[in-house]
Amino acid sequence: MTDNKAYYTTLALDLARKAGAEAARVTLNETLLELSGVLNGRIDKMTHALDRSLQLALFVDGRFGTFSTNFLDESALEQFVYQSVAMVRMLEQDPCRSLPPLERTVRKALSGKELGLWDESWQQWTPQRLRTLILEAALWERKEALEQGFRLIAEEGELSVNVSDSVVVDSNGLYARHMETNFELGFEVTVEDAQGQHYEDYWWDASQTREGLTPALKTCAEKALQRARAQMAPREIPGGKRTMVVDAECASRLVTPLLNALGGYSIQQQNSFLLDKIGQQLFPKELTLMDLPCTPGATGAKLFDSEGVAAKDFPIIDQGVPTRYFVNTYIARKTGLPASIEAATRPVLRPFGGCRTRDDLLRKMGSGIFVTGFNGGNSNTSTGDFSFGIEGFAFESGKLTHPVREMLISGNLISLWASLAATADDARLCMSKLIPTLAFLNVDFSA
């Protein structure tokens, strides 16, 4: 990892000014990945990857362009900057392009470690150590003892540590740094039943700290196996309107279209089903979706966006009411909308309904379909109409009864979220969107 980041970013800014740019922003990113993969009890993959890139945003004579390079020696960087400025001069003018004013940018991200997302012990997970740990975590050597009513056909797993360090500076005086480590483990398992049918599923976990991932080394592969076994002997059930409970593992799939619809580019293009919906009571008053980017030690936390604008905790949807759009500096100047952060950083849906676990929520809802995964489908960004393939389980009297596959849910996203009845309090802390298990009423299912 490069120690003299300040030198290269300052040099790039100085070169941009000398080449004739009125303003510039420089972002230097470095990532290091160490990964070990296992397939059926044997090491299948070993990866060591160091990536470094410098992105340059240039504002020249009322024109704008972005460029990137991974060559950081002085002569190569000088040539890169001067050629980039020359290319921007050939573009059409765009008077709405500018840097964010300094007062909107972050002031407290100087070391990069302010959020406590950096684990110095990452270097202890050497390739040799990763190899040993992934082999110990795998099930394959114990497959004969595990196989009862099924055969373990395939097991694939990966264990990795990812180190990232980024610095953003601009000609207005911004300096911001973000550093984090991420330890991740995942397994995918395929089983075969007595009729020769195959079923597969996965499980994964992640943590910013080495110790935070340690417990998953003993449980991750077995969890993937349990999920695969649970899919055996699916049954068809008729379509119709049913209660739908969506597992925390995949519930963010239903939140992402809402966030996209609140994005400034969608609003500027008038391609959003939430256009002109700010301040309206669209959803139940119990629904509050927060953006909490400044939470120390939390996955997905970050103090600034790609422009260097300071992130803040705020409600995205407050008691059922959308509060604002995500508008960067450019879209704010094009539309006249107030500038904010460019996108949600760490969305967190507040639980309601008094249920702590998934099982509590299933008991509360009685009967319906418990969705554990989405497999295809799409949604219309302009209207909010959607059709998603799902898989999961039927449940009766609060208990899972049998797997279901190859079913569709369809409807409109505003109507769907308006039917949100309750949630659990079980959001997975390893995910960047903290969405618990959700329960919706009267969802249209078709076989």
Image (spheres, helix red, strand yellow):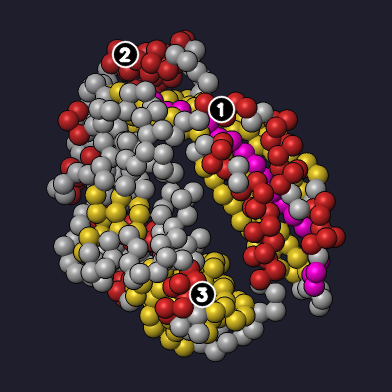
Residue annotated with mark 3: 370
Indicate whether residue 29 is drawn in magenta: no
Marks 1 and 2 sit apart, C-alpha to C-alpha, by 36 Å
Q: Nearer the viewer, residue 64 or 56?
A: 56
Say which amino acid is labelled 3. Phe
Q: Nearer the viewer, residue 82 or 366?
A: 366
Say which amino acid is labelled 2. Asp
Is residue 99 shown above or below 7? Answer: below
157 horizontally vs 122: left or right: right
Span shown in magenta? 148-167
189 horizontally vs 68: left or right: right
Q: Earlier in the sequence, mark 3 or mark 2?
A: 2
Rendered residue at 50%/30% (across/down): 119
Q: Position of residue 54 (x, y in %)?
A: 44, 25
Residue annotated with mark 2: 14
Residue neighbourhood size for the residue with mark 2, other residues' Cα within 10 Å, grouped as few (<14), some (14–19), many (≥20): some
Q: Position of residue 215 (x, y in %)?
A: 60, 46
